Image (tube, rainbow, N blue to C red):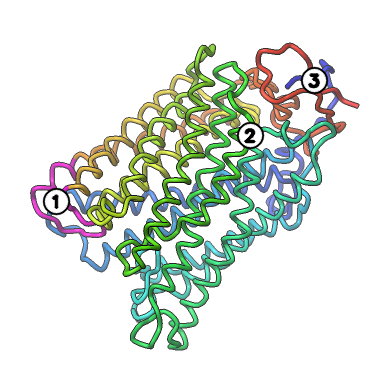
Amino acid sequence: MTTDSAEPKYPEHTYLNDGYSLKSWLLTKDHKRIGILYLISITFFFALGGLFALLIRLELLTPQGDLMQSDTYNKMFTMHGIVMIFFFLVPSIPAVFGNFLVPIMIGARDLAFPRLNLASWYMYMAGAVFALYAIVSGGVDTGWTFYTPYSTAHADSHVISTAVGILIMGFSSIFTGLNFIVTIHRMRAPGMTWFRLPLFIWAHYATSLIMILGTPVLGITIALVGVERALGLGIFDPANGGDPLLFQHLFWFYSHPAVYIMILPAMGVISEVITCFARKVIFGYGFIATSSMLIAILGFFVWGHHMYVSSQSEYAGLIFSALSFLVAIPSAIKVFNWTATLYKGSITFEAPMLYVFGFIGVFTIGGLTGLFLAALGMDRHVHDTYFVVAHFHYIMVGGALMAYLAAMHFWWPKMTGKRYPEGLAMVGAIAVFVGFNMTFFPQFILGYLGMPRHYHEYVPEFQFLHIMSTAGASVLGVGYLIPGVCFLWSLIHGRNAGPNPWEAKGLEWTIPSPPPTHNFEEIPVVTEEPYQYTSEASSVRHS
């Protein structure tokens, strides 16, 4: 999208220099500053979760458990899972880029409820304090899934404080989702019809529905675990007359849709980046938008495929298996449409596009291996093995995290007004892709050969594959450090980016970089379809 006013007059101040004091940031109601606060917070938790992962991989270098005791190892992989899932992956793209971009992309000056938006960050930080307390006080050893009776019968594990932290953090997700839904419904610029919305907005709208419908179920489930643990009530613990299968049903009813909280925004990022660097109208806009909504809806009907070996009815297993195959179709639609967008495009290979190519490759492998786990017979063989670990990380790390890095590189010039060193950023993208596959592809083989997950001792025959995986993790770690170097360098030495360094379409590229405090001097009027890279027509005029 472009604007028919070549030199718009904007206020001199931007969201970055509109008050430098710490108080002005901690009390801000500017959606862009709140996005930056989230960025700082989740970067810390990403580093913390990565530290736990490093210790896990070092332990697995040798077949003997010679670096840590089994109980300590249990706490390592539990805290790695809790930190990375609840405090990084779930909030990463919605909290950072959703907060920063949703109002600008639809032509609004802020989210519908600015104070609620700030409250959501404080809820996130409050939940983080409880989780950090659990870590420094000895950790949790139940696994990130909190399966009972592990979470209800162990007296030496800080389950309650962790559960309280996750419960509070859940309110942050609900507030954010509610804010996005109301904003998208009520605050779109004139002419911004539903089918002129950027696909990034469609992805966040679908994600927000999952947030507000699914997160309360997790909150109730975790609260019941805390009540049972504190008062000794028989809810899930079979020793007290409870039903552990009930916990799994409640937990996975949220936690499988939570996969789409992590991956749907990532898909929105890919749609934005791929059409920019292919210089083509996105192929099948309507199908991609509709598929986001289908994923959000169907995602609530497949939780039972996590429970094939848990004494669940075989007839229920057949139904969940069929539904699990069905939910793969909307994701496949997106991949085929992205591929068709690339066909005969004028493709350039900047860092954001390299992450997009990496995403498509690893997400496709992750999706195809998910079909193995959706099949009842195959799942019995690979359930609770490293095959599941590899599949999950191909979707979450290879998918969600690679898209997060694509978003960081694509919108960093817009957020800061500075360019990063493109060559070094491309090296980082290649290192992430190579290191990721070196780390997790051997784990498919380990799982198929029968290596159980969560074990810190294993038979010597598996050592070579574990050494490969740990070596890959070292490359992956370097790959993650390189973007940090690029972004920090750009803040000090980066050249000015200008309003639209990528020559991209979209309302966010019609305003200065970094954006003014109130985004637009005048609310824009949208007059053409999205992603018109082949059209010279102006899409926006300022009234």
Kind of residue indicated by mark 2: Leu
Q: Residue at x 71, y 30 (%)?
A: 508
Kind of residue indicated by mark 3: Thr
Which marked residue is nearer to the observer: mark 3 or mark 2? 2
Which marked residue is nearer to the observer: mark 2 or mark 1? 2
Give yes or no for contact between labels 3 and 2 (Cβ–Cβ under 8 Å): no
Q: Position of residue 35 (x, y in %)?
A: 64, 45
Q: Is residue 53 visible in the rendered structure shown here?
A: yes
Q: Residue at x 74, y 40 (%)?
A: 103
Please tell me whether residue 112 is drawn above or below residue 222 in the rendered image. Answer: above
Mark 2, Cα crowd under 10 Å, few <14 / some 14-19 / many 20+, is many
Q: Is residue 365 magenta?
A: no
Residue tagged by mark 3?
Answer: 3
Of labels 3 and 1, earlier in sequence is: 3
Q: CA distance from mark 3 to mark 1?
A: 60 Å
Report whether 63 appears left or right of 312. left
Please tell me whether residue 204 is drawn above or below residue 429 in the rendered image. Answer: below
Kind of residue indicated by mark 1: Thr
- Disc on res. 543: none
Residue tagged by mark 1?
Answer: 62
Give yes or no for contact between labels 2 and 1 (Cβ–Cβ under 8 Å): no
Q: CA distance from mark 3 to mark 2?
A: 20 Å
Q: Position of residue 522 (x, y in %)?
A: 87, 31
As helix, strand or loop, the secondary structure at mark 2 comes to helix
Which region of the structure is painted magenta? Answer: 449-467
Of labels 3 and 2, earlier in sequence is: 3
Please tell me whether residue 379 is drawn above or below residue 486 in the rendered image. Answer: below
Q: CA distance from mark 2 to mark 1?
A: 46 Å
- Disc on res. 199: 2
